[in-house]
Amino acid sequence: MGNCFGSSSAVDSPPSRPATITLPPSKKQRKGEQAFVTDGVISLRDQASIYHEKLVQCAKESQDAYKRGDKGKARTLSEQKKKWKTKQDDTNKKASNLILQSQNWQTSGEIDLHGLYLNEAIDATTAFLKHWCKKSNYKNRKTVLVITGAGHHSSDHKAVIRPKVEKLLQQQGHIYESVHGNGAFKVTLKPSQ
């Protein structure tokens, strides 16, 4: 049976790109914004966008089939949509991991959220703060840097990640200040208890 793109092999074998291994950018390369958004990350985000387009198409065709009374086809298309969603999520997770793994945030005390989607940025910030709070104590309170960006790369140039990270810092009771032209937070950690 075909899928919403007219062939039965599209779900099993999406268009492939040659696999490339990307090394973390050197310190010299990291001076610009979005330095951790490598060609590998861009390729993964592009692939995730293709999967998203396919799941939207399957959803539309599933709804159309249901309206026509073809419930079997609607169900099949709905299942295909779920497969595309899984592929999209997995691919975005790989992109997020690629951005974060090249930063060595576990040893540097700094995390750069450029290139991450909102939910990825919040999850990464939560893990980062948890890791560093464990290393902090009341005698030796550690300070870390969370680079959010000021929103220049967001639609309408409005920060999306920055306000949510600030809310997270407030909820967790950290002392922080805005630095780098409102593109980062210098955080004095609240030691874990």
Image: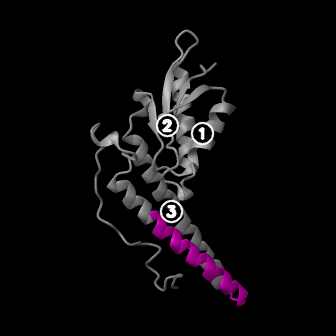
**Residue bearing mark 3:** 88
Q: Position of residue 181 (x, y in %)?
A: 49, 37
Q: Give me the disc on residue 165.
A: 1
Along the viewing direction, whichever of 186 and 45 lies nearer the viewer? 186
What amino acid is found at the position of numbered circle 3 in the picture?
Gln
Q: CA distance from mark 3 to mark 1?
A: 24 Å
Q: Does residue 92 lie above or below 103 as drawn?
A: below
**Residue at (27, 38) in percent of width and height:** 28
**Residue at (54, 58) in percent of width and height:** 155
Pointer 3 with pointer 2, Cβ within 8 A: no
Q: Secondary structure at mark 1?
A: helix
Q: Is residue 76 visible?
A: no
Q: Position of residue 179 (x, y in %)?
A: 50, 32
**Residue at (38, 50) in percent of width and height:** 37
Q: Is residue 90 visible?
A: yes
Residues in magenta, as a range: 48-72
Q: Decide if residue 167 is on the left or right side of residue 14.
A: right
What amino acid is found at the position of numbered circle 1 in the picture?
Val
**Residue bearing mark 2:** 181
Q: Secondary structure at mark 3?
A: helix
User: Which circle, 3 or 2, is nearer the viewer?
Assistant: 2
Q: Does residue 62 lie above or below 143 as drawn?
A: below
Q: CA distance from mark 3 to mark 2?
A: 34 Å
Q: Position of residue 66 (x, y in %)?
A: 70, 84
Pointer 3 with pointer 1, Cβ within 8 A: no
Q: Give me the disc on residue 155.
A: none
User: Magenta: predominant secondary structure element?
Assistant: helix
User: Which circle, 2 or 1, is nearer the viewer?
Assistant: 2
